[in-house]
Image: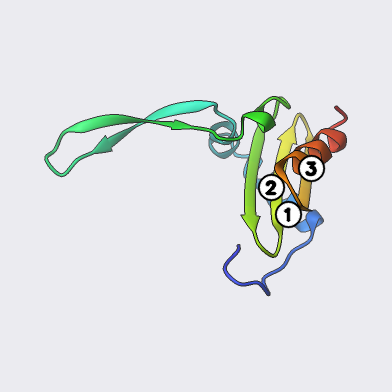
Amino acid sequence: SGLDPFNVSTAAEVARLAAAAFARPEIAGTSVMGEFAIPAGRPDGTVREMTVVNRHATLLRLGLSGAKTGFLHEAQRTAAVRRDDTVAVVLHARSLEERNRWLADLLGD
């Protein structure tokens, strides 16, 4: 969870959690959207749309159906992704390029 450095997990455990989360369309689908608009209410009662852009464009090029990324000093760059029936997990990548290369390898690209 990132709340405590002693809260650790394995790639296999993260893969099981990711598979369960990505089995829910509302989680998997929104995690790989390029961008979307959400209504934001203001104190005066007016509503304005805010555009949210997915900053993980390089991951989206892998044709994913679900993705969760993260960064902690202890874990470095991490990701759990799904494409078709495959869930791939990378822990402790030293750069985004390394993380993405490992994911592409795991997914057979």
Expressed as whole percent of the image width and height from the top left, the position of residue 26 reads: 53, 36
Per the model, the C-alpha gap separating discs 3 and 2 is 20 Å
Expressed as whole percent of the image width and height from the top left, the position of residue 1 reads: 60, 62
- Secondary structure under tag 3 reads helix
- Secondary structure under tag 2 reads helix
Disc 3 marks which residue?
Answer: 98
Describe residue 72's horizontal placement relative to residue 92 as left or right.
left
Residue at the spot x=62%, y=29% of the render?
A: 57
Residue at the spot x=16%, y=33% of the render?
A: 46
Disc 1 marks which residue?
Answer: 14
Per the model, the C-alpha gap separating discs 2 and 1 is 6 Å
Q: Nearer the viewer, residue 50 or 94?
A: 94
Q: Is residue 6 above or below residue 72?
A: below
Mark closest to the chain's N terminus, 3 or 2: 2
- Secondary structure under tag 1 reads helix
Disc 2, disc 1: CB below 8 Å? yes
Residue that protrudes farthest toward the left in the picture: 44
Say what amino acid the circle numbered 3 marks.
Glu
Q: Nearer the viewer, residue 21 or 61?
A: 61
Q: Is residue 102 above or below residue 71?
A: above
Q: Nearer the viewer, mark 3 or mark 1?
A: 3
Per the model, the C-alpha gap separating discs 3 and 1 is 19 Å
Residue at the spot x=69%, y=29% of the render?
A: 64
Disc 2 marks which residue?
Answer: 18
Q: Quadrant of residue 7?
A: bottom right
Residue at the spot x=65%, y=39% of the render?
A: 67
Mark closest to the chain's N terminus, 3 or 1: 1
Q: Nearer the viewer, residue 86 or 4?
A: 4
Say what amino acid the circle numbered 1 marks.
Val
